[in-house]
Image (tube, coloured by chain):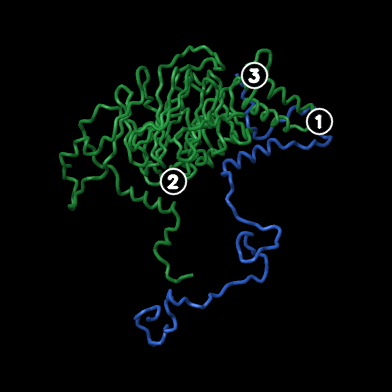
Amino acid sequence: MGSLFGDWPSFDPHNFSQLRPSDPANPSKITPATYHPTHNRTVPPPNQGFEKSKITSVEVISTEATNILLRQFYQQAEEKLRPKRAAAEHLTPEHGCKQPKGSFADTSNSLP
Amino acid sequence: MSPFKTPKKVINNVAQLVHCARRFYENLVPSYTIYDVECPDHSFRKFTDDGQYLISFSRNHQDLIVFRPTWLSFSCKEEDCDPHDLPSKAKRFESFFTLLYCVSLASSNEVICKDFFLYMGSNQFGLFATSTAQFHDAPAIGGAIQGIPSIEKISFYLVRLEDGVILDEKVFYNDFVNLAHSMGVFLYDDLLAIVSLRYQMCMVITDKGRQHELPVNRVENGLQHNQHIPGSSFLSGIKQRLLSFIFRGIWNQEADHSLRVQCLKKKFYFHFQDYVDLIMWKVQFLDQYHLLIKFGSVDGGVSRNADHHPAFFAVYNMETTEIIAFYQNSADKLYYLFEQFCDHFHATSRNSLYMNFISSHSNNIHALDQLKSMKNKANSFSQFVKKMLASLPFSCQSQSPSPYFDQSLFRFDEKKVGTVIIIEQAHYAWS
């Protein structure tokens, strides 16, 4: 069995002679080098990696269930339905009813 | 990493692949028209988006007739092919289309609605509708809304297009569903929403797996028509949810109690009856749990000029039965969402990848330029907003994913193309 590069020309015929394509009958016993982290700042999610982690919180990138448009709707709803804190004493009665900024319903258009 | 990159890795995602394939169409454009072809006397409706079928109806609108298109079949290998005439067989309808079958869908006093057709591309099913005549002055009995016409019998048919076998049928009696341009129905994956305007109900039908019987999954605790209980002003279903949402929004705007009450009087109680009188006009899916619903007055549906009648949009979560959002049709906030995220209003099925390639002002710079130029030319921003939002909720399958309508490849005059791509102003069937 020839080298990985077969009969490719090379300066020295003994170059690459150590490289052998893997033989299914005789699998290579060389284990590839692996990386073992020396810190836990980049721990993979709990269901991956070779070590069960004792880390309590792991940041995992995942797909959001709702699309961006729906997230916008929910965000606007949250802003709208969040109760306003009571204002300080300098809110005087003669200001009347405040016009909400960017109202969802343009209430200046009166309904028929 | 291997130093030997294969060319396959250059195109490493499907979207890129599809865009490459679509750009090929810049070189393949229609350039020849054949006139005076003798065609069978049918009412030709539509090619399915995958090019597999040509849908047509008999002249009396009672039979479904489906053809298989035979695509490219002639080639010229010479240097200059233009002077060549096409062979005589090109003038024959049969050279391009093979009749697959003719199936009767409507009988006696029913007709097939020629504007109604929805295609389920993944399994090549087609949804058709037949109806009897409309009655305009139908009495408002049994929970029906006054002012909406009634149709004695509306039938929906699920047909396997490969062989014309009718797989399922759903019938509505003395009801009204807006069948024109499939506006009263919305298909999303295996969910089918049907809006009964007459009874103010939205039915969501699911097709589980390969069953062809469509079990009805009515949104029980959500969308129900107003129950007029004598002596009681109790509102149920979505109307109650809507009013509650509006109330809470106004309540939370003010921290001071007396201001709060003033705001409620002016914005809520003053308009209370108008809100109660709103009816559901049209519905679309935003995803499998969320519906975008258009509300308006009964008169607004009848009138050609919808400008003078208020219209509202609500986002409804079918799972939690909550209203998430409520906007008037002139709302800036809703318009900005429409401008930025138009694509997400086109809820596209997981199964039809090519539907993701429809040009819109959110994914195409030329379309965005057109929109901005319209915005700048508009006399009133509020009118412009109403006009743009009038296209919501989108009608299902109303836009073609054809590369010829891709605005990154071609520019075209929408008016000359007609209603093929966009139906902007939805005028309802009874007006």
Mark closer to the observer (3, 1) = 3
Give the mark nearer the N terminus: 2 vs 3: 3
Instruction: Determine crowd level at label 2: few under 14, some 14-19, many 20+ residues with C-alpha closer than 10 A.
Output: few
Q: Label 1's element?
A: loop
| On-image quarter of the C terminus of chain A | top right
Q: Amino acid at mark 3?
A: Gln
Q: Nearer the viewer, residue B124 or B51?
A: B124
Q: Nearer the viewer, residue B274 or A60?
A: A60
Q: Nearer the viewer, residue B104 or B420?
A: B104
In terms of image quadrants, where is residue B103? Answer: top left
Instruction: Determine crowd level at label 1: few under 14, some 14-19, many 20+ residues with C-alpha closer than 10 A.
Output: few
Q: Do residues under tags 3 and 1 come within 8 Å of each other at their CB atoms?
A: no
Instruction: Determine crowd level at label 3: few under 14, some 14-19, many 20+ residues with C-alpha closer than 10 A.
Output: few
Q: Do residues under tags 2 and 3 come within 8 Å of each other at their CB atoms?
A: no
- Say which colour chain A has: blue
Query: What's the CA distance linking mark 2 and mark 3?
Result: 45 Å
Q: Label 2's element?
A: helix
Residue B378: tell me if it is visible.
no
Residue found at x 84% / y 35% = A89
In the rendered image, residue B382, in percent from the top left (x then y), is placed at 56, 30
Query: What's the CA distance linking mark 1 and mark 2?
Result: 58 Å
Residue found at x 74% / y 27% = A97
In the rendered image, residue B55, in percent from the top left (x then y), is placed at 33, 33
Q: Is residue B30 left or right of residue A40?
A: left
The residue where tag 2 is placed is B353
Q: Which one of the lettered chains is coloured green?
A: B
Q: Chain of mark 3?
A: B
Q: Is residue B71 left or right of residue B299?
A: left
Q: Which mark is residue B273?
A: 3
Same subunit: marks 1 and 2? no
Using the image, determine if residue B13 lies above or below residue A91.
below
The residue where tag 1 is placed is A92
